[in-house]
Image (cartoon, rainbow, N blue to C red):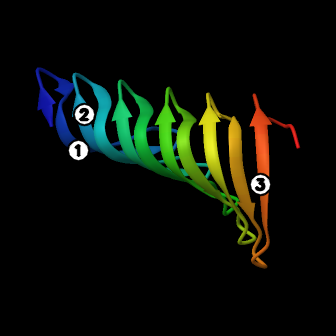
Amino acid sequence: MFDNNIRDGQGTFNWANRNRYTGGWRQGEQDGYGTKVWATGDRYEGQWRHNVMSGPGNYSFANGNRFKGNFRDDQIHGEGTYYFANGDRYIGTWINGLREGPGVYYDAGGNTEAMTFRTGKRLN
């Protein structure tokens, strides 16, 4: 896991604040496929690039919500599905962490609603 005292390859690192990462390392950075669990209870499993979530992944929030889709620069970015703890879900596109463009909201009871967003604000 270490190459010249720099994390490289596969391994686990535990921070003093109780965050933990298990997965790929490249030149001391989280890189490749890995899982990070934060002390808050949040968890991300997916692709990393230069210490940030980047590419396809699954993010589970401590409150029971979760997102499956694409990430860029540690933010939800691109196509994906956001699952709410109450059973509802939203399928659509995000740009820099904000919903963007058309999407569909499905509630736990089976109802659907088409929605359109611009920079995170609902237009309809």
Secondary element at image label 1: strand
Q: Position of residue 4 (x, y in %)?
A: 11, 20
Residue 87, relative to residue 97: is it above or below? below
Q: Position of residue 40 (x, y in %)?
A: 62, 49
Q: Which mark is residue 70?
A: none
Name which residue lies at 52% across and 31% down: 74
Name which residue lies at 77% across and 37% down: 117
Mark 1: few/some/many CA within 10 Å (<14, 14-19, 20+)? some
In which quadrant of the rendered view does residue 3 lie? Answer: top left
Q: Position of residue 110 (x, y in %)?
A: 75, 77
Pointers 1 and 2 in contact (CB under 8 A)? Answer: yes
- Closer mark to the observer between disc 3 and disc 2: 3
* Mark 3, residue position: 114
- Closer mark to the observer between disc 3 and disc 1: 3
* Mark 1, residue position: 11
Q: Which mark is residue 25?
A: 2
In which quadrant of the rendered view does residue 122 lie? Answer: top right
Q: Nearer the viewer, residue 75 or 25?
A: 75
Which of the marked residues, 3 or 2, is nearer the chain's N terminus? 2
- How far separated are the C-alphas under marks 3 and 1? 43 Å
Q: What amino acid is labelled 1 in the image?
A: Gly
95 with respect to 17 (left or right): right
